[in-house]
Image (spheres, rainbow, N blue to C red):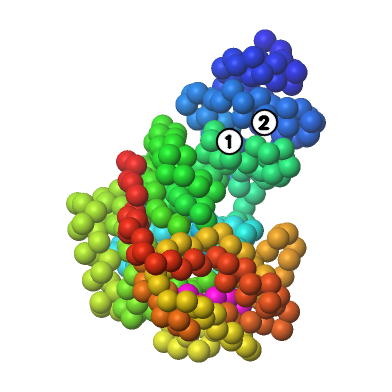
Amino acid sequence: MSMNPCDIIRKKRFGGELSELEIRAFVDGVVDGSFADYQISALLMAICINGMTDRETLALTLAMAKSGDTLDLSDVPGVKADKHSTGGVGDTTSLILVPLVAACGVKMAKMSGRGLGFTGGTLDKLESIPGMSISRDIDAFKRQVREVGCAIVGQTAELAPADKVLYALRDVTATVDCLPLVVSSILSKKLAAGCDVVVLDVKTGSGAIMDTPEKSRQLAQMMVRIGNLSGKRFSALITDMDQPLGNYIGNALEVEEAIDVLAGRTQGDLKAVALTLGAHILRNAGASGSVDEGMAMLEQKIASGEGLRVFGDMIAAQGGDRRVVEDTGLLPKAPRRVELRADRAGYVTRMHTSDIGNAAKLLGAGRERKTDALDLSVGIVMHKRLGDAVKRDDVLATLHVGEKSDRIGAYNLLKRSIEIGDAKPEPVPLIRDVVE
């Protein structure tokens, strides 16, 4: 059969199931430029409208994973693990679970991207640590994973280059939230990065890509199904994003909160999600017999200070100032603070999480475009959670404001994003579901 782009587009347009050969031809055409943008866009829309079977989605994921370099971690002894979050606000779980899981003996080999969104990605957060480098060649990356037990670096290899082209076109053709395309985009990069065990954190709520529990569950189930069909061990947690996960939002601020958790100074939702994700990694990697046993191991690594020590080792291995783990005063600090106070008494009934994230972005903590420079010192510290009682004039949040921050825009958006009412709202479970 001919591998003419039009034949492949026509077949999917009429609801046919594409063969592995056709899907490989499509991905090859995306990478070598033999498929024109308008042909790729037409096929993306046909996939979006008619869907894909598991067999097609697996074929697309594997073809994308093999479209560039693939990392071979087989010369790093032991089980290698990774974690992926669909992204949220105040979501600093990687900086907590990576050193803790490594302290329990499971290698964490994490390649991250830059953040496009409310605040920077994990890499931007790490770059707020003085001297910290997120650039490592493959050999140095593997050596660090072997010696320290963990590394979080930028993607140096050309991993899944097909995804870059497809993602840019999905963005401008309104096909971003199409399930098979989301799944193949996320999983192709994870499979190319060479880990044995991957745990996914799928967010649901007002600050998430998937805003309803049903959509989030569909995405989680499909990612775990396709991930396990690829021969790796996948699990997913569906976690709540109807309020920021941590209380600190912004790059240096989130590093500070992660260190507070690792040092045993801070409890709360951020710690709970980080440890639950970590416990699933330990269980799936065979380092613990159950999730509960994994939780206990991670708590012990906080209590003994070993998790914080490993985080310091990772920072030092990547050129950063390891004293930061003992003294968060070494992190960049914004020059001004502005308090947002309650104009009435009652309970915090609702938070518009994406607006809180956008307020942090107006301060300079996040990017609109890849080329935007961040102010790593700015952000928001939340002082109230959903359901908290509030008196008139109580401080709801503190804005950490920089020289170029849109202070008034951020303040007004933040004010609108926190609703206070008379009745205490019903608590929502933090971890909505687990998909094995």
Q: Position of residue 377 (x, y in %)?
A: 60, 80
Question: How many numbered marks, from 0 up?
Answer: 2
Image height of 370 relative to 66, above or below: below
Q: Position of residue 189 (x, y in %)?
A: 55, 46
Mark 1 belongs to which amino acid? Cys
Q: Position of residue 247 (x, y in %)?
A: 45, 72
Q: Disc 2 on helix, strand or loop?
A: helix
Other-residue count near label 2 (Cα within 10 Å), few / some / many at <14 / 14–19 / ≥20: many
Side (left or right) of 233 relative to 179: left
Magenta-colored span: 378-382
If the image is split into quadrants, where does the N terminus sit?
Answer: top right
Side (left or right) of 283 relative to 109: left
The residue under label 1 is 178
If the image is split into quadrants, where does the C terminus sit?
Answer: top left
Image height of 422 relative to 3, above or below: below
Verify CB contact (< 8 Å) between mark 2 and mark 1: yes
Asked whether 400 or 280 is in front, the reply is 400
Tell me if I can see residue 272 in this picture: yes
The dominant secondary structure in magenta is strand
Asked whether 82 or 119 is in front, the reply is 119
Q: Residue at x 50, y 47 (%)?
A: 211
Asked whether 258 or 426 is in front, the reply is 426
Q: Position of residue 376 (x, y in %)?
A: 62, 76
Side (left or right) of 287 relative to 165: left
Between tags 2 and 1, which lies in front?
A: 1
Q: Residue at x 63, y 41 (%)?
A: 176
Mark 2 belongs to which amino acid? Leu
Determine the image quadrant of residue 134.
bottom right
The residue under label 2 is 44
Tell me if I can see residue 196 in this picture: no
Label of residue 421 in the image: none
